[in-house]
Amino acid sequence: MADFQEKLERYASLAVQVGVNIQPGQTLVVTAPLASAPFVRLVAKKAYEAGAKNVHIEWQDDEATRIKYELAPDEAFLEYPMWRAKGWEEMAENNAAFLSVLAPNPDLLKGIDPQRIANANKTAGEALKTWRTYPMTDKVSWSIVAVPSEAWAAKVLPDQDEAGRVDALWELIFSATRINREDPVQAWKLHLEELDKKADQLNSKRYRALRYHGPGTDLTIELPEGHLWVSGGSVNVKGTSFVANMPTEEVFTAPRKEGVNGTVRSTKPLSYGGVLIKDFALTFENGKIIHVEAAEGLDVLKRLVDTDEGSAYLGEVALVPHRSPISDTNLIFYNTLFDENASSHLAIGKAYAFCLEGGKEMTEEELAARGMNSSIVHVDFMIGSGELSVDGVLEDGATEALIVNGDWAM
């Protein structure tokens, strides 16, 4: 069995070689919390060894973030450093790759005024709107990975001995990302091939709609003509493959913006903006969210839905079997990167252009005309469980079972 340092080296290599798949002469942009510094240094080393021209690292600090939310004046949350937004646009235009390293504290902003959180998220979303078009149309390679923080480990593993929590969470991450396999890169290749087969199956069916049934859920989602099911592997405009989420267990597509009706209930907490939103339900009419409820975090959820016109509509529908490596841990990770890959999910906000035939080359207006939603937000939330069933509706109105009691029926 590989020791910890060897696993860490493998994980950094995986992020560089499979995640963003850095190419010779390319710049890698890394955003990362201070807690992840040892891992990020390894990432930089692996990237330079692979031929990267430059590794640009932007550090974040949870404590400084909390201090700002507690003490800064309200107007501070209505400003965003445009030099940063323009810099990212310039780097994306020059084919940089982007890696986000997460080490979250799910309760970082607990107790903070929800309006401050909403203002900060909206301001950042508007400033980064142009840059976001690059990853959402596969123009650049991008990936997200996670490392433990003490706060995150305590949330996920509260019954674990305090001294061993971070190590235990590391092992869960290594397992979910296939680092414990003899050849992680080959394991990922085979895994992505299996996901691609599932996406191909769904694409061959050309379903007109999906129908969801489960506790608190009775929902119909129409799919736009020419929709495409895709999986974790992507190819950027230069023809370079990459994997946006590590881990990934999903196949997903875009819904028709105005074709969602009914109610859906969450099955896992949503960590959004440093606040947990728990046990919530959304009701849709002609695509739009017309009612929200939540046992906790309702104000934050309402403000999320009210961010802009598109944040009251869906932009993604993803199918994930209940029996999956992450789900089988029987843990809630309080982090969407992991929880969305243990559960079928939906996303509020912007649709991915590559989920529509020819979508990568379409303008925003052309995408909208085809039923694709646009927004400055894209927030996934979990709806899957061992009690969820999903049917596909064919063009002639006949239905086929896709998921029964949480798992694939295809």
Image (cartoon, grey):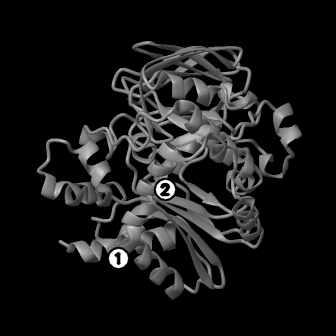
Disc 1 target residue: 9
Q: Nearer the viewer, residue 394 or 185?
A: 185
**Which residue type carries mark 1?**
Glu
* Residue 233 position in % (x across, y down): 56, 56
- Residue at 37% in and 64% down: 35
Disc 2 target residue: 192
- Residue at 46% in and 33% down: 344
Q: Quadrant of residue 320?
A: top left
Q: Are circles 1 and 2 on residues that touch, CB within 8 Å?
A: no
**Vertical side of 382 occupied by 78: above or below:** below
Residue density around tag 1, few if under 14, some if 14–19, many if 20 or more, within 10 Å: some
Identify the residue at the far left of this view: 161
- Residue at 17% in and 71% down: 1
Q: Of the two numbered discs 1 and 2 on the same chain, state the one appearing first in sequence.
A: 1
Q: Report, in whole angstroms, how far the alpha carbon at label 1 lies from the one at label 2.
A: 22 Å
Q: Nearer the viewer, residue 92 or 6?
A: 92
- Residue at 42% in and 78% down: 41
> Is any part of residue 377 visible from this angle?
no
